[in-house]
Amino acid sequence: MSTISDPVCAPPTHAAQPGYRTLWRWHFYAGLFVMPLLLVLAITGTIYCFQPQIEPLLYPHRLVVAPAATPRLPVDALLARARTALPPDARALRAHVESDPARSAEFVFALPDGTKTGTKTGTQESVYVNPYDGAVLGTLDVDRRFMQVDRMLHRKLLLGKPGELLMELAACWTLVMLATGIALWWPGAGASWPAALLPRFGTRGRPFWKSVHASVGIWLAVGALAFVLSGLPWTGSWGKQFKALATRASLGAPRGAWGGGLALKSALPGAPAAAAAASGAAENPPAGHADRREHSAEHAGHNMASMPGMVMDDLPLPLVPWAVGAVPVPHSPDASSTPQHWTLAQVVAQMRDLGVRGGYDIVLPATPDGVYTVSYFPPDPKAERTVYIDQYSGAVLRDIRYEDYGAVSQAISYGTSLHMGRYFGLANQLICAAISLGLGALAVTGFVMWWMRRPARAKGASMLAAPPSERAVPPLRAWKTGLVLLGIVFPLMGATLVAVWLFDRAAFRRA
């Protein structure tokens, strides 16, 4: 709860309690590391919560159009208009289908600069088109779009994998900060609960900052804990391993997501029957969803391995539901001819028939044997859809819905929607902003308290002004057990716990 600070407005008797100073030191170390990163998370997280309101203000001439009485142009015609704004060899990657009549049509292209087509690597450009008259409204570099930069700052500090691991560590150390902050704050015998819950406005100097820090921290503790736990599954190290573990336990991705005979490939017209039969039959769909798998048997003959190394998280999508992030992208035999293709307009009409009218993205087939991948990631997790459509016949190869997820993935879907401020509209955004800014306030007040109590002429390790250690270290079995368990669950966190412990013994105990 606290950052780099001293005990938080607790009764004087607390200082005499065994273990108090030990908890204070760990609270100090957690805050020392988390404070700068907490400010980054607070600012970027608050901004990202209001993406729906901010982006139209930043790019009004590209994103916003005047609704017209005339019907929208066919999506394939809009895609053709978008192509004219870029070099001829730019490849269309994704189309965003919007139901809002006041929003433009958006198409994402891979530019001809060595981009690895079909993945998130390389330069990608969004082209915006007026859906009523086909006028090209402008372009935006996908990676330099303001909200994308804000999101990458929030997730990885724009430092790639090292930044992602650093932010993951910050989240884990926030758990230590919260636990020790609550323990330090907890009122002792004879203490007044109202006095502990409210700032002491009659005081000045460091006591005032301590009371504000403690009150803000305790009121935000539950929300901060929810923020950390809902964000950790998206981290690049632990989150990836957790997703794989949940999938193996049938609690994460939908059944069959790692292969096992699902017909998730475009059926190439004229493919030899013998070769098709050799590839195996499709896996039976989950109970209760056979009505959505009516085309599986028809295309069971083309069940082959997924494209090596390509999963849903690799596709050029702005957001992918956590449950399907590790689902392999379909792959099928090479085409020897150019058969008739299912058009983008037909895919849109198909999704309308499936009950999805807008707010989704369509990844276009990147190869002759690819499929249309439709990703619908709405505020309500129960409406999430991932649909694979054969690019030649238009067959729905698989329709993954919320009820297909495992129990862990269902919980994470709700946590993600709440974490991003999407689930219950503006109220959700305001609550998330209050928690984010409150965490930033904890960082600021913690720094102020540290600045007030630091030795003016200290040198070396004492410049950190760490709380004094106890002469006789108390057992603190529950606390030590909690740290060990935390280090086991989060191995990266465990390594830094050991490093901090060794640093504390070497630098401060000797002094």
Image (cartoon, helix red, strand yellow):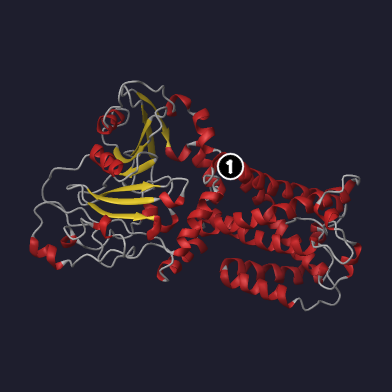
Q: On the image, which quarter does residue 106 sit in?
A: top left
Do we see residue 306 in this rendering? yes
Q: Tally the marks.
A: 1
Residue positioned 60% across, 54% down in the render = 227
Locate residue 110, reporting x and y percent.
Answer: 33, 40
Residue positioned 64% across, 66% down in the render = 496
Mark 1: amino acid:
Gln
Find numbered disc 1 in the image and state the secondary structure of the residue it sits on.
helix
Left or right placement of residue 445 versus residue 47 in this view:
right
Q: Quadrant of the N terminus?
A: bottom right
Locate residue 141, reporting x and y percent.
Answer: 43, 36
Q: In which quarter of the image is the C terminus?
A: bottom right
> In the rendered view, would you say 74 is above or below 293?
above
Q: Residue 357 or 176: which is nearer the viewer?
A: 357
Q: On the image, which quarter does residue 346 sit in?
A: top left
Do we see residue 236 in this rendering? no
**Residue designated by label 1:** 429
Left or right placement of residue 508 versus residue 251 in this view:
right
Q: Residue 197 or 232: which is nearer the viewer?
A: 197
> In the rendered view, would you say 461 is above or below 350?
below
